[in-house]
Amino acid sequence: MKIDAVDLFCGAGGLTHGFEMAGINVISGYDIDAACRYPYEKNNHAKFVAKNVIDIDADLINKNYRLNSIKLLAGCAPCQPFSNYRQGKVKDQRWELLNSFARLIMETQPDLVSMENVPELVRHQVYSDFVMLLEKQNYYISSSVVFCPDYGIPQSRKRLVLLASKLGKIKLIEPTHKKELYLTIKDVLMDLPPLEAGEANCNDPLHKASGLTDINLQRIKASKQNGSWRDWPEELKAPCHQRASGQKYVAVYGRMSWDSPAPTITTQCYNYGSGRFGHPVQNRAITLREAALLQSFPPNYQFINPEATRVNQSEIARLIGNAVPVKLGEAIGKTFVSHVAHLDSFVH
């Protein structure tokens, strides 16, 4: 039995690519961000549709599925409204996107559902309502907080993964990597050409290091792997580090550790001062290619249209930082493939 999937909030295609690697037939991806179209369609077999999920109806979704296929509807609503950073702030209108996803599940009645987001989502009523709706629609549900290195992702990101099936009980496949076999930054980045701050690789426009001011260049040279600004001489410390409110932000201007998974890759990962995004052994911030590899995108995944007149670095960083890690998508996809195969063999 073949699984046909539709990917809502598809972004640049991290989840879709993982699904395709697992053998799932992804028909289309929907996202409001038109910048996703090129990387999504260039690297995947699915069609990109630039459309707000709020404006999508059941007919639009259902026409994607083939007759007699197993229907999968996947969605990773923007996670920023539910992150720790946003806690206690004004309610974000993007909360409604999860409700729109729930509405489409109710209207289309797919056989399988996948939802991925930040672990903090479970604290919110919108998540409880989402689970309750699935239960009322007779789905078997499992959810877990996944530590990404357990599934071959060289990044210490944690994600909430919810799986639902009308076909039977379902659970995410067991971790593929034990702690002693976690992929490290060195494992995935060591073969890339070295760069100085502000330098670009002529063969890959994504492998370009942001420039550094003189003082930031001095700061990264004084930084230890997995250390902090506390390792610097006093004259290099920023005013914010002297204030009590700045004492706890030890990762800012930090250097990564060569022999560990990376910290969570964000949309600002190419900026040295936005977190622990200093290269482990080179005096610069990581490049967008390095960020993509740490998100487990394949080395040849293309984000930049060769016809573009210029590279919008912040735009590409947004696509990479917001993506579902490809290997996590593959693990979810393999779960569904195994789930359906088991049921198929049981029936026959």
Image (tube, helix red, strand yellow):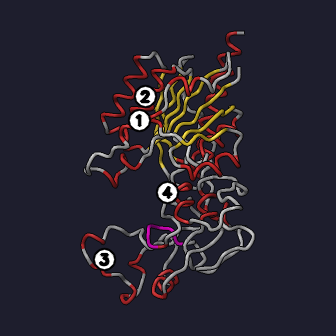
Residue hosting label 1: 98
Q: For the residue labelled by badge 2, is the local secondary structure a helix, a strand or a loop?
A: helix
For disc 3, the marked residue is 240
Kind of element beneath mark 1 = helix
Distance CA(mark 3)–CA(mark 1): 37 Å
Residue 289 falls within the magenta-colored stretch:
no
Q: Amino acid at mark 2?
A: Ala
Image quadrant assignment for residue 132:
top left
Q: Residue at x 45, y 21 (%)?
A: 106
Label 3: few (<14), some or many (≥20) within 10 Å? few
Kind of residue at badge 4: Thr
Q: Which residue is mark 4?
A: 264
Q: CA distance from mark 2 to mark 4?
A: 28 Å
Q: Residue furthest right?
A: 203
3 or 4: tag closer to the N-terminus: 3
Marks 1, 4: nearer the viewer:
1
